[in-house]
Image (cartoon, grey):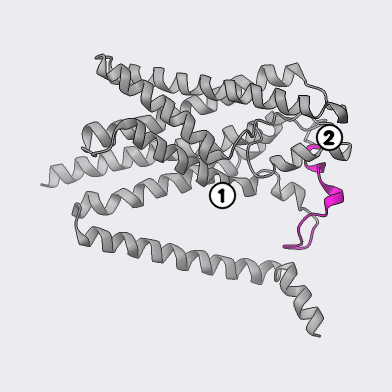
Amino acid sequence: MVLDLTMSMAILALMGALATIAGCLEDLESDVGSQSNPNSQVQLAPQMGFLHRIYNKAVSGEPVSNGLSAVVAGTVTSVLLSQNYYSLTAIVIGAFVGAIILAIYATTSYAGRVASQARFKQPLYMDIMRYTTPTIMAHNFIMNFCLVAICYIQYEILGYPFTIPFLALIWGISAGAIGSSVGDVHYGGEREFQNREFGCGLNTALSGRIVRKAESGIRNSIDNVWFCAKFGGPVTGLALGLTVFFSSWPTTIWGYTWTAVGVGILIVLVFIILNRLLEISVRDAYGPYKEEKNEKEAKA
């Protein structure tokens, strides 16, 4: 019994580690390709007279894009496993095919978007496409590998009733959603809104300036991913890793019982309370949101 529990916890720890890496690389992949929320600033830049050197592949939201990439990787892996390929070989090939599919969408999206902005004299920089696309593929390949490895563990070792492609779709969407919600704050947000009053938003006349200045010269996508690798990527990975760990930990200990369900609900409640306390702390430190301040001034 103790040995079984130890092995289960070891498998859970491995899944958490893989999810942490996958979450980190997913966020960095979206940053280097400008598929986070601030990509709207990149799209607006030429219209505001700011030409830029940032790759912009936002053909869809991050959850949809990553779900597609992951499910392609999971499907190819399942087909290869059915042909008696070694597990590791099948996962690697599947992850690579998923990365290729994403690269196709990325290049067509980026080139098409720039072409549609020709009236604003936005050029298509071939060097940006040449060295950014492989970077996007590299990040996506690692994410696909980690997510499909998690799905393989769940299906083959833990005996989940769902197939590897279906699990890959769910985890791909989850990774994209977490990257979109957690990682976006640390891509451009602090540069867009620096020297601005807390919660004041961004004036339309300032749109597009997110793309202007980097540490050296005009900012490009490699500048973005370099910056996000310091904090945005790791904190996104931590969020996905904790999601996998805390969603699997109760059933690992107590099995599929009501006790596990109760512990899961308790974990969610604890995080809700912690998030609320964090929000209160931020408001106390930086002042009320702009809307609230305007209301107080109007009443005064």
> Judging from the image, what secondary structure is the residue with disc 2 in?
helix
Mark 2: which amino acid? Pro
Q: Is residue 3 depicted above or below 282 in this figure? A: above
Residue 187 included in the magenta stretch of the image: no
Q: Is residue 193 depicted above or below 290 in this figure? A: above
Residue 239: percent from left, percent from top: 47, 48
Q: Is residue 216 depicted above or below 61 in this figure? A: above
What residue sits right under mark 2 in the picture? 46
What residue sits right under mark 1 in the picture? 181
Quadrant where the C terminus lies? bottom right
Q: Is residue 2 left or right of residue 250?
A: left
Residue 192: percent from left, percent from top: 76, 48
Between label 2 and label 1, give the one nearer the viewer. 2
What secondary structure prevails in the magenta region? loop
Q: Is residue 149 left or right of residue 141?
A: left
Residue 194: percent from left, percent from top: 77, 53
Mark 1: which amino acid? Ser
- Residue at image coords 87%, 40%: 48
- Residue at image coords 10%, 47%: 1
Mark 1 or mark 2, which is nearer the start of the sequence? Answer: 2
> Judging from the image, what secondary structure is the residue with disc 1 in?
helix
